[in-house]
Amino acid sequence: MSAACRLRRLTAALLALLLGSLLVLAVAPAPALAQLHAHPDGNGAPVVRSLESLRDLDDQSWQVVAYREGPPGGPLRLRIVGYPGKVRLDHPTALEVRSGRLLWALEDVTLSSTALAGDTRSAAAEFDLAPLLADLERNRPLRLRLPRVFSELAVPPYVVAEWRRLPDAPAA
């Protein structure tokens, strides 16, 4: 076999390997990433939020929004929203959060929220997120429990990472 023939075979093999690798990268699913979004609220005040849809153990979908109002250092909130008509959230009810052996009870601040206090659908609740974020040192998964509503809502590490960035994220 001549050197030119070997070189053509080697080139063809390398090209096939390169195309195969590109195909695998193109077909592989992208990792799920929550993203922080900065925008003004209805009054023009800056808001930074992380929005994610999560499912509880009963396969019910919940919208989970962690947000900060105003500049860095502003209030940190966690809003949990179910589908109106399928769930009714009573207030005040503390949100229980677990990570390993650690446990937090986040204060229900729904009735102090002007957006939620008068909402007759009662499908949303809002909690003070600051105590949790002050204690978290790693992006470990969290388990949320809202008594009489859901027994476990898993929050993956990539969402926890977004929440941990909220206090210092630049405002819009």
Image (spheres, rainbow, N blue to C red):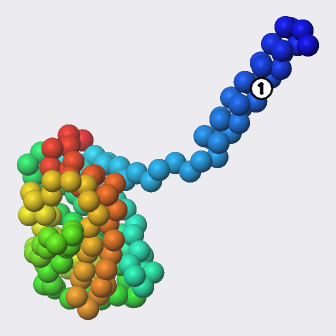
* Residue 157 location (% of width, % of height): 31, 58
- Pick whichever, 122 or 155, lies toward us: 155
Q: Is residue 166 above or below residue 97?
A: above
| Residue at horizontal 71 percent and vertical 31 percent from the top | 17
Q: Is residue 153 visible?
A: yes
Tell me where residue 125 appears, x and y as whole percent. 23, 76
Determine the residue located farthest toward the bottom in the rendered image.
148
Tell me: 86 left or right of 28: left
Q: Is residue 146 above or below residue 19?
A: below
Q: Please give the name of the residue rendered at 15% of the width and 49% of the height, measured from the top-left corner.
A: 167
Quadrant of the frame with the C terminus: top left
The answer, for residue 65, to whether it is visible in the render is: no
Q: Residue furthest top?
A: 3
Considering the numbered disc 1 on the image, is that residue within a helix, a strand or a loop? helix
Question: Which percent across, then down, holds residue 171?
Answer: 20, 42
Badge 1 amino acid: Ala
Q: Is residue 30 above or below residue 10?
A: below
Left or right of 80: which side holds 135? left
The residue positioned farthest toward the front in the image shown = 1
Q: Crowding near pointer 1: few (<14 within 10 Å), some, many (20+)? A: few
Residue at 83% across, 15% down? 6
In this rendered view, identify the residue nearer to me: 44 or 154.
154
| Image quarter of residue 153 | bottom left
Q: Residue tagged by mark 1? A: 13
Q: Where does the N terminus fall, quadrant-wise?
A: top right
Which of the 4 quarters of the picture holds residue 57? bottom left
Q: In this orientation, which residue lies closer to the viewer: 147 or 48?
A: 147
Q: How many marks?
A: 1
Question: Where residue 112 appears, x then y in whole percent?
Answer: 10, 73
